[in-house]
Image (tube, rainbow, N blue to C red):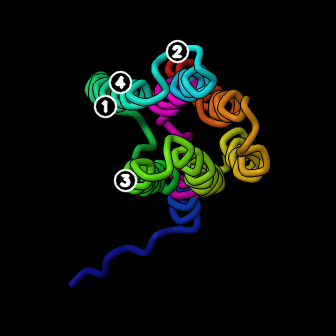
Amino acid sequence: MTQASQPSAEDLAYVRRLAESGARAPLNGGRFMAWWGLLIAIGWTAQHLAVNGVIGDGSTIFGYIWGSFSIAGMLGQFVLARSMPPRAGEGSAGNRASRTIWGAGAAVIVSMVVGVAVLSQSVGYQAFDWIVPVAFAVYACALIVTGRLADDRIVTLAGYGAAIMVGLFTAFIHHPDRYLFAAAGGAATVFLPGVLLMIRESRTEG
């Protein structure tokens, strides 16, 4: 019988470099972050206008705002997913974690929305204010974990920014312009990092 040849030190080093490069592969979900970040910034801006009586009737308008948000979000998610070509690094730890943690985070936010919708029947639309810090907590966890795994400083810093927004919005939860703070925070911590990831993806493809 012939013995299988043992891998050389050069072979092992090559495999190790491949594994390390895969582990540090760039995140490729920038288009999804940008889309949802844009929608949440628009949604919270519309919420600000509704809360301050600029638009709507102070009641059903909130359902229209967030119903439209949900429909647009899911349609956009579907179109973006279908149009996204296969990319290198999809199996990296950062990208696999990104898909899982954002999905789990979405489930948490939906659960919170359902509970708050029930509560609002007795206490009014103010109950919806508490969704915002929960949402930013979800963003912080998702961004910090995926940013660390992918060694992506932009995403990691955005996660810490989202963590700061949890306390900032809570501190100003009775301020009339609180949803403008939230909209600016959503744009800065989700939309802008998503755009930067998209720009980096396009440069890599070129």
Could you tell me how far apart the alpha carbons at marks 2 and 4 are, in whole angstroms? 15 Å
Between 63 and 33, the one lying in front of the other is: 63
Q: Along the polypeptide, which appears first: circle 1 or circle 4? A: 4
Query: In front of the other: label 4 or label 3?
Result: 3
Mark 2 = which residue? 55
Could you tell me how far apart the alpha carbons at marks 4 and 3 are, in whole angstroms? 19 Å
Relative to 96, 41 lies left or right = right
Taking 49 as reference, is 121 above or below it? below
Mark 1 = which residue? 74
Image coords of residue 85 (percent x, y): 33, 26
Query: In front of the other: label 1 or label 4?
Result: 4
Label annotation for residue 68: 4
**How dense is the environment of label 2, judged by Cα within 10 Å: few (below 14), some, or many (20 and up)?**
few
Q: Along the polypeptide, which appears first: circle 2 or circle 4? A: 2
**How dense is the environment of label 3, judged by Cα within 10 Å: few (below 14), some, or many (20 and up)?**
few
Label 1: which secondary element: helix
Mark 3 = which residue? 118
Rendered residue at 70%/51% (across/down): 166
Q: Along the polypeptide, which appears first: circle 4 or circle 3? A: 4
Rendered residue at 76%/37% (across/down): 175
Give, as a three-letter code, the residue at label 3.
Val
Relative to 60, 43 lies left or right = right
Give, as a three-letter code, the residue at label 1.
Met
Magenta extent: 17-41
Taking 188 as reference, is 97 above or below it? below
Image coords of residue 74 (percent x, y): 31, 31
Give, as a three-letter code, the residue at label 2.
Ile
Could you tell me how far apart the alpha carbons at marks 1 and 4 are, in whole angstroms? 10 Å
- Can you see residue 161? no
Label 2: which secondary element: loop
